[in-house]
Image (tube, helix red, strand yellow):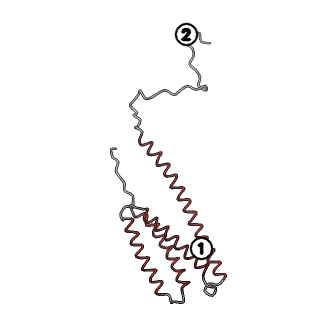
Amino acid sequence: MLGATRVDPIGGKVSGALLVVVLAVIVAILMSLVYVLNPSDQHVPALLEMGILSLVFALLAYFGRAFTHQPRFPQAISWGFTGLGFGLLLLTLGLAPSGTIEGLQRVGGFLVVLIALAVVLLFAVWGARGAASEASRGAERARWASQPAPNALNYAAAAPPATTATQPTAPPTGGNPP
């Protein structure tokens, strides 16, 4: 087409696999620091910190999809971090010894984590529905784009509109007017 230019999306600057490797190295370093810096009798707070760190990295990987030309890699690691984070938080809150987390803190922690999990699941369903509708729209766009463009100068293709029962008919020719 004349005058049409190709616009590249914002993403496409970084490889998705490279982003995943960088995030994995940073997570390994931070998780090791959490493990080393917490005393040996503070396993429960360390596990809670690791769960929160996993959820933070899940968000970073999710938003990192915008900067890659392979968004499936960061999306996959985002789901992995999400599962790890919620798993660590729920299992730590549920299985922690009774002296480490008090009853009200445990119930409050469960409520916060379950509400966050519900929000994540709602957004996941919303995103899946959006992807499905975008796929059907993309198929319709492809079908429309494969058809030849109509030519405004082709008078043979133009047809008069069909007459309907609501339109008046032409008067008979050769008769006397009323």
Q: Position of residue 66 (x, y in %)?
A: 43, 63
Disc 2 is placed on an element classified as: loop
Q: Name the residue at 52% across, 52% down.
A: 133
Total residue callouts: 2
Marks 2 and 1 sit apart, C-alpha to C-alpha, by: 87 Å
Mark 2 = which residue? 174
Find residue 43 and report its image quarter: bottom right
Mark 1 = which residue? 113
Q: Position of residue 141 (x, y in %)?
A: 45, 46
Q: Position of residue 77 (x, y in %)?
A: 46, 68
Residue 72 vs 29, above or below: the answer is: above
Confirm or deny contact between disc 2 and disc 1 (CB under 8 A). Answer: no
Mark 2 belongs to which amino acid? Gly
Mark 2: few/some/many CA within 10 Å (<14, 14-19, 20+): few
Relative placement, left or right, of 170 versus 107 is: left
User: Considering the image in quadrants, where does the N terminus appear?
Assistant: top left
User: Considering the image in quadrants, where does the C terminus appear?
Assistant: top right
Relative placement, left or right, of 72 versus 115 is: left
Residue 154 vs 30, above or below: the answer is: above
Residue 132 vs 115, above or below: the answer is: above
Mark 1: few/some/many CA within 10 Å (<14, 14-19, 20+): some
Find residue 9 and report its image quarter: bottom left
Find residue 157 and report its image quarter: top left
Disc 1 is placed on an element classified as: helix
